[in-house]
Image: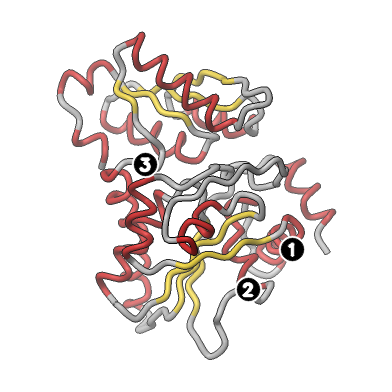
Amino acid sequence: WRLTRLSDAARNNGVVAYSSGNFAQGLAAAGRAQGVPVTIVMPADAPQMKRRATEALGARVVLSHHGDRPREEAASALAREIAATKGLTLLHPFDDPAIVAGQAGAALEAMEQLAAEDAHADVVAYPVGGGGLIGGVSLAFRNADSDVRVIAVEPEGYDGMGQSLAAGERRRVASGETTVCDALQATEPGVAPFAAARLAGVTGVSVTDDEVRAALRFAFERLKIVLEPSGAVALAAALSGRLPVVGKTLLVFATGGNVAFDSFAAFLGRAD
């Protein structure tokens, strides 16, 4: 939806964004469908399969090397530099009202599926990095049903949204921790996503890497679904008892399966 709002000149010149791979693939696919050239700045340590998938969708991928800096900061700085020097439109992966609004479509699809089954969700849990998805999803659910509870789920050490919501203002986490959730390493929520999530009354929880690995195994063995760690955090929160779901109908969003075979096998091997 964000690409449809570009001017003709901006569409012809192209866009640039930074992403570890999931937003990158979505933007690359949208760009190919609409004839908009896409450049993606991706951290050098992002999974190779995400890079290859993004390139296969027609995007140009430029790698950023973050050193001691948070990798999001390094990638963002390089994307801004490319936008300035190449005349491209810079798109933020989550801190953009149009991006947040566009993500509401995921909630609309979920509500359509629930309605088809004559079902109603009491609690909705969603993986969160910078917050673009949870911002749009939370507003869509709250506009449709003020009683639904929306919960942001993040990896431990990268729970900027949860801490910000609890404090009532945006908070930055200075985490030196590692996490298997490579796509959820934002150090603070975006301005627009935080405003949307706060307005919708979202609360946050965090999960450990071990809980994420257990969720990967559960999804594979019981649900026959292959998930990447970042896409499994909401399921991990449900399975570990971190969500208020007793007597409730829970809707869990599983948001990605971009994982290499060797990595996936290693995750399952370490799951309890």
Q: Earlier in the sequence, mark 3 or mark 2?
A: 3
Label 3: which secondary element: loop
Task: Look at 62% across and 32% down and name the residue there.
Answer: 46
Residue denoted by label 3: 95
Q: Which mark is residue 144?
A: none
Label 2: which secondary element: loop
Q: Between 163 and 180, which is closer to the camera in this rendering?
A: 163
Residue denoted by label 2: 242
Task: Look at 37% across and 75% down and name the residue there.
Answer: 114
Left or right: residue 172 versus residue 155 is left
Kindly identify the amino acid type of the residue bearing the numbered disc 2. Answer: Arg
Query: Looking at the picture, does residue 185 appear above or below residue 50?
Result: below
Specify the quadrant that holds the C terminus: bottom right
Residue denoted by label 1: 214
Kindly identify the amino acid type of the residue bearing the numbered disc 1. Answer: Ala
Residue 3, image x, y percentages: 26, 34
Query: Looking at the picture, does residue 126 appear above or below residue 260?
Result: below
Residue 75, image x, y percentages: 52, 26
